[in-house]
Amino acid sequence: MCGIVGFFAKDGDQAEVGQTVLGMLRALGCRGPDSAGVALFGRPANGSFAVRVKLGESGDLQSRAKRISGLLETFPGCGEVTATCAYARFEAGGGTDLDGLARAIEMLDHDFEVVSIGRRLEIIKQTGSPDNLEETYHISKFRGTHGLGHTRLSTESRVDLSHSQPFWSHGLPDLAIVHNGHITNYHQLRRRYEQRGVHFYTENDSEVVAIYLAEQLRKGGGLREALGGMLRDLDGSYSCLAATEHEFGFVKDAFALKPLVMTETDRFVAVATEEIAIRAAVPGSYLVREAQVKEVRVWQR
Amino acid sequence: MKDVMQTSGTFQPAVIEDIQAKAASGLYRIRGWGTLRERRWATFDDLTFLPCSLTRIPLEGYREKCSTKTVLGKRFARKPIELEIPVMITGMSWGALSYNAKVALARGARTAGSSNTTGDGGMLMAERENSRTLIYEVLPSRYGINIHHMRMADAIELTIGQGAKPGTGGLLLGSKISDVIAKQRDLPVGVDQRSPARHPDFLGPDDMIIKVEELREATDGQVPIFIKMGASRVFDDVKLAAKAGADVIVVDGMEGGTGASPAILQEHTGVPTLAAVCEARAALEDIGLYGEVQLIIAGGIRDGVDAAKAIALGADAVYIGTAALIALNCNRPLYVEDYEQLGTEPHHCHHCHTGRCPVGITTQDPELMKRLDVDEGAERVANLLRAMTLEIQMLARACGKSDIHHLEPEDMAALSMEASAICGIPLAGTRKVFGR
Amino acid sequence: MAKISCGGRATREINAEIRRAIAAGERDIVVEDPGARHNLGVAVLEPVRLRFAGSVGYYCAGLIDGPRIEIDESAGWGLAESMMNGEVIVRGSAGNGAAAAIRGGTVVIHGDAAARLGVSMKGGTVLVAGNCGYMAGFMGQKGRMVVCGDAGDAFADSLYETTCFVGGQIQGLGTDAVVEEPSQEDAAWLDATLAQYLPGARRGQDFKKVVAGKKLWNFDKREWKVWQEAL
């Protein structure tokens, strides 16, 4: 159970996405004291991919980043590794075998997890509050086009970095999701995916949302069809935001069980669990309304 | 030669009757009381106390004090509630119970230095007048909810569900929706009233945090806020309730009672009370709030022994419901012909849902209600509460405690492997804890 | 008139200041920059006028008895929940569960209402100038609900005695909801009430009236199809 937020600038690529998403998350803090995370879409696409790797949950992690540098020597086209707190980050060239790279990194150390890969996507998440996230990673400095954010109140699964949101759909670059609610046919869906060889990294039911949307997008439809498919195939409660390189959207479940409000002007779209988040971080004059039952909205750049 | 009578273990007489009743009505069975199945799961009966012998020194009864004072709501409330004893009366609706029953419970609890709780239907002024400490329940139906009454209460109990039927709403059949009950609940007379399963204005633990704050605002932060749940995913639910800001968490186990509910829910939903208290304590320890957030356990508490064991396992207090009604004469051999008219007998009656309670407790019929004398009933309830308290003290003293709240799991041994595994207590005769 | 500025303060402090103002005899209070905070104006029991110059969060005007509360922009979940009496006016839209479990008084929403408008309402009047969302009026016990625009799916599901009126289209009726012609008295009441709170809305006799079919009031196995949905 949590707070989710999303911000989408309609023009330009230097919007203060980090600052805005952070401000929205801070206002929702009481909903989710366990962890906080953001999925920010920035850097103009120039063919290469940003890769972010979790080095571990705690302790001295930066020394571990060296092992990744070592590995990257066998992957031509990959840049230098920088390490900040729990994350290592580097850029991989456009032609890199991303699946192979991700597998190789995760085989290096059982604590390593590739948290996001994307031409524009960067996921940064950790246990603790949005303020902790800002202190460590300076989210407010990030400029780009759109972003998602999440603060978490753990219900049934663990509190650690990997179990935090946003979730990247492992394997499909640039797709990130945040989910508020509980998927009640999660175990059944998980078993079916595992039968087909899909690997789950957590016991957090929100992870299956990312896997499901990735599967739908790979079939060729856009984000709208994928989010609409959730209404058919995923049971339970959800307000869910998803974003890719060029798309940003939400879906609300068939019984309107979880809150989600939105506002749209000719310059931006802002979506959040509560209006207080939008008012706290997005200046200007605009009307906010609650999303309706089964509503699916997607915006494109 | 006649065949030996063999009864199928699968299609037992009760099952045959159930199927045939459904074949006639097309509806699931509804009744009162709680689970009727034989208790084959681990219960408080699977634990025994280890009194002092050589390693520890017992306390004398009568002379050496054994305190029973109980304080609830210390976490955030400005005015926690202080009780003389750790046994409290749980919420039971006026509607399910008669007016005389509600007043008798209030008075009996007052005499014994304990608390009473309203129920699904709002507060009777007579309850407030006759209660020493009154807990005001806010349920999904919101029947009778009145801000002025709320502000007269000593604590607010936000009820998510109850042990007999977690995850579902209440039920009061038409025969008990009398004029006066209908008016209290704003319902048409004589309907089969179905309460919703969910609260109307919050749906998840994250919204509940805001709801708890609203209740605090409405009561100026003075009184404790309880969150009550039927035992289901206790380990997760108790942590969420604590994170939502509850002062006190109430967990109501599977053996809990109800005035009317589908039989299958009473039998096959929820987790037994023994398991619930152990999970609840483990949940609070997991988030470092054990001792800060108080725990009330309910669900088939029958006597001081059950209460003492629940307290030893981590409860700060227990609620009784069915036991209190039994003290009021429920299932007593009086008006026996009326039990027979219902198709039952004393000691076997669980027909609360019919509204024809032979002893005037779970009825709205004024003639039947007259059979329950309020003063006599109050005295019987007070007697039960006192007797239970003496039982708890006796066990506590035998274990060397001058305060019943000092009872611990280590004061007991398990009599079965399941109880050992569930409670983390060694199995008697082995010095070993199973299943951990 | 008293002006209260929220500044960076928490709801508890703001509510405390509102209470102090009322105790000091103020009868007309404006609260600026409410910023969609939760629990503003909860349990106000005096017949004062309290205006929030902005948006409010959850449970604004919850558990009130007597005041007139105005909200300039939007409201979150549970607006005026369990109100005993009073008036609550929202110029913008309201979130889920607006007027949940109200026992009296009047709630007016100038924009749209989200899901479960008037759920379990036990009296009073709810008026929406715009549209309402999913499952409005669910288990409504008494009182009246008026939606001038369109109603969402599962409208007036499992009603007891609440009377509902819809001016526009009904996406789908809930279990045991039946549509009737409004009576002369209904039309007169609608005209008078709308004239008072939503002038310019359509005429009373143009509304559809929705009430309980009463098939769910006492279980009857012959109405099994109806009960299958409800149970």
Image (cartoon, rainbow, N blue to C red):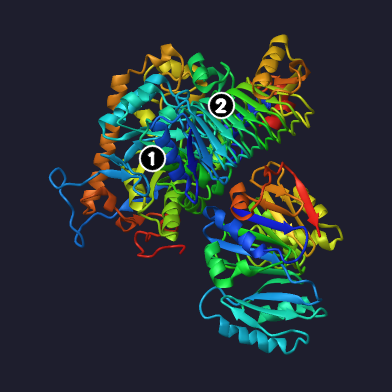
How far across and down, in percent of the image, does residue B37 sit? Answer: 50, 39
Q: Tag on residue C138?
A: none
Is A194 located above or below residue B117 in the figure?
A: below
> Residue type at mark 1?
Ile
Q: Chain of mark 2?
A: C
Residue underneath mark 1: B301
How far across and down, in percent of the image, does residue A135 sit? Answer: 53, 70
Residue at x 70%, y 48% (from the top left corner):
A263
Q: Which corner quadrant of the image does residue C208 belong to?
A: top right
> Residue type at mark 2?
Glu
In the picture, the quarter occupied by the C terminus of chain B is bottom left
Residue underneath mark 2: C87
* Viewer-nearest residue: B161 or B360: B161
Q: Residues within 10 Å of mark 2 (few under 14, many from 20)?
A: many
- Distance between the alpha carbons at the discs numbered 1 and 2: 46 Å
Say if residue B285 shows up in the picture.
yes
How far across and down, in percent of the image, does residue B19 sit? Answer: 64, 31
In the picture, the quarter occupied by the N terminus of chain B is top right
